[in-house]
């Protein structure tokens, strides 16, 4: 997090001013002035007056949280058909059978609930994987596109055209992918592990992305073992296509099962390819390791090794209350709190690297140039009810004030009355 010093063009009046907020531990408290949706000034003491003034009184102010991998349209359906085995295979089967029953109104209601909860918990951006296939058509995808418009100014939604049921093995999906981009998808999605030929799948979506000059986001190597990974091929394809910095992958759990040598080779390749990795602990801990009888594995992307190897790593929610993840509420700080022990990120030197996995790292993955708490950037921020940045995750603080483009979009106050 960086703050630029007070500049000469300080406005006499601002729309909103935070007084004495904690932007960084060990640095002076700051006033933050917001005008016309942007951060107008940041300094220890600002003379300008805000139409709205908020006394932060030392509470922590962070840039908006970024939910970098989420499925809106299949959230909150757990009660309709359960996944009894808890395996990925049954999760895909259960959800595939439910999807054709989703009506537009049903998807709207559940997706709006997710988006409202995200905003309440401080997310100002979300990348939504919106799926379609010949069985369900575009009902879910079109609804997510409409919600992107409906929620403009509240939360920015990047829409990924996501072929959950595969492309090669599900005839008709290829034409739907092209149509999805023409309808307005921001990003081309892929799922090589759920198709007949992973390399052919990767080649196909790369061609589509290049034809339309779109970024790519894959569901990648979601397995407990390292036997059938296509990540090396994907990374080389990224470099060969000059797509460095434009490709993200979610899950990548198989990499956690690779030998240290192979893992490190792949991590170097990912760094060179500028591929971002979204670790999805809530889903991957639930579905992974189901055949282990003792010492059940964590089956997560190796977050520490990726981070130390210079790869851009993010933490994300993926699913909320469905066959893939039968719990969750869209609170990214809870996801991070889960990742602390699960990814061995609780050490004194590690904890400070975790909050960026919800903020600046996903901003880089989603390529948001106006992101961050600095003068001139978009005024997307969250006031946390805690006094140290280093406590932002372990406190699970209330998100007191959530600001999107300079406007307060949510407030939360938590009050306990002790009766002893
Ligand atoms: Zn996903």
Image (cartoon, helix red, strand yellow):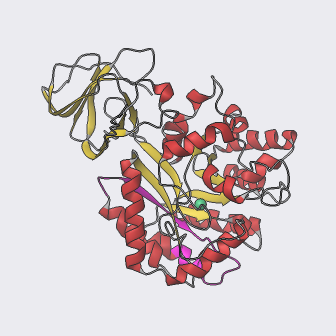
Note whether 31 is above or below 92 in the view shown.
above
What residue is drawn where x is 36% and y is 49%? 120
Query: Residue 82 in magenta?
Result: no
Where's residue 334, x and y in %? 52, 44
The answer to which of 270 and 130 lies nearer the viewer is 130
Q: Is residue 298 left or right of residue 105?
A: right
276 and 251: which is toward the camera: 251
**Quarter of the image with the C terminus in it:** top left
Q: Say if 331 sits above or below 220 in the image.
A: above
Q: In this rendering, does residue 257 appear at all?
A: yes
Disc tally is 0
Q: Is residue 161 magenta?
A: yes
Q: Residue at x 37, y 40 (%)?
A: 399
Quarter of the figure with residue 272: top right
Q: Is residue 167 visible?
A: no
Q: Which region of the structure is painted magenta?
A: 152-178
Q: Quadrant of residue 348?
A: top right
Residue 83 placed where, x, y %? 65, 71
Q: Is residue 310 above or below residue 145?
A: above
**Residue at left 66%, top 26%?**
347
């Amino acid at each position: 997090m960086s703050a630029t010093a007070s500049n000469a063009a300080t406005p006499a009046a601002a729309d909103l001013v935070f007084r004495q907020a904690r932007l960084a531990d060990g640095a002076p408290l700051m006033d933050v002035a917001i005008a016309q949706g942007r951060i107008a000034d940041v300094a220890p003491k600002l003379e300008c007056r805000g139409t709205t003034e908020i006394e932060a009184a030392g509470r922590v102010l962070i840039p908006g949280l970024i939910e970098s991998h989420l499925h809106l349209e299949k959230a909150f359906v757990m009660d309709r058909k359960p996944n009894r085995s808890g395996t990925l295979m049954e999760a895909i089967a259960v959800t595939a059978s439910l999807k054709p029953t989703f009506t537009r109104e049903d998807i709207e209601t559940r997706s709006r609930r997710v988006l409202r909860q995200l905003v309440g918990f401080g997310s100002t951006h979300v990348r939504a994987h919106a799926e379609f296939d010949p069985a369900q058509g575009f009902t879910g995808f079109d609804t997510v596109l409409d919600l992107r418009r409906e929620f403009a100014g509240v939360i920015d939604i990047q829409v990924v055209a996501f072929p959950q049921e595969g492309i090669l093995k599900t005839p008709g999906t290829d034409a739907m992918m092209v149509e999805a981009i023409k309808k307005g998808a921001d990003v081309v999605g892929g799922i090589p592990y759920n198709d007949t030929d992973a390399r052919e799948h990767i080649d196909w979506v790369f061609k589509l992305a290049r034809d339309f000059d779109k970024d790519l986001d894959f569901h990648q190597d979601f397995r407990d073992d390292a036997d059938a990974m296509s990540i090396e091929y994907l990374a080389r394809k990224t470099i060969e296509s000059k797509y460095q910095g434009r490709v993200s992958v979610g899950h990548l759990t198989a990499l956690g099962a690779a030998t240290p040598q192979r893992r490190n080779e792949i991590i170097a390749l990912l760094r060179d390819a500028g591929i971002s990795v979204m670790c999805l602990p809530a889903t991957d801990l639930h579905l992974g390791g189901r055949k282990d009888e003792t010492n059940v594995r964590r089956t997560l992307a190796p977050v520490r090794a990726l981070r130390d190897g210079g790869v851009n790593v993010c933490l994300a929610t993926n699913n909320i209350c469905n066959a893939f993840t039968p719990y969750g509420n869209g609170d990214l700080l809870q996801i991070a709190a889960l990742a602390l022990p699960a990814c061995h990120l609780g050490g004194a030197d590690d904890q400070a690297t975790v909050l960026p996995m919800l903020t600046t790292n996903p901003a880089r993955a989603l390529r948001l140039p106006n992101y961050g708490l600095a003068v001139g950037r978009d005024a997307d921020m969250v006031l946390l009810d805690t006094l140290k940045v280093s406590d932002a995750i372990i406190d699970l603080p209330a998100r007191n004030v959530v600001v999107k483009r300079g406007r307060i979009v949510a407030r939360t106050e938590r009050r306990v009355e002790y009766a002893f």
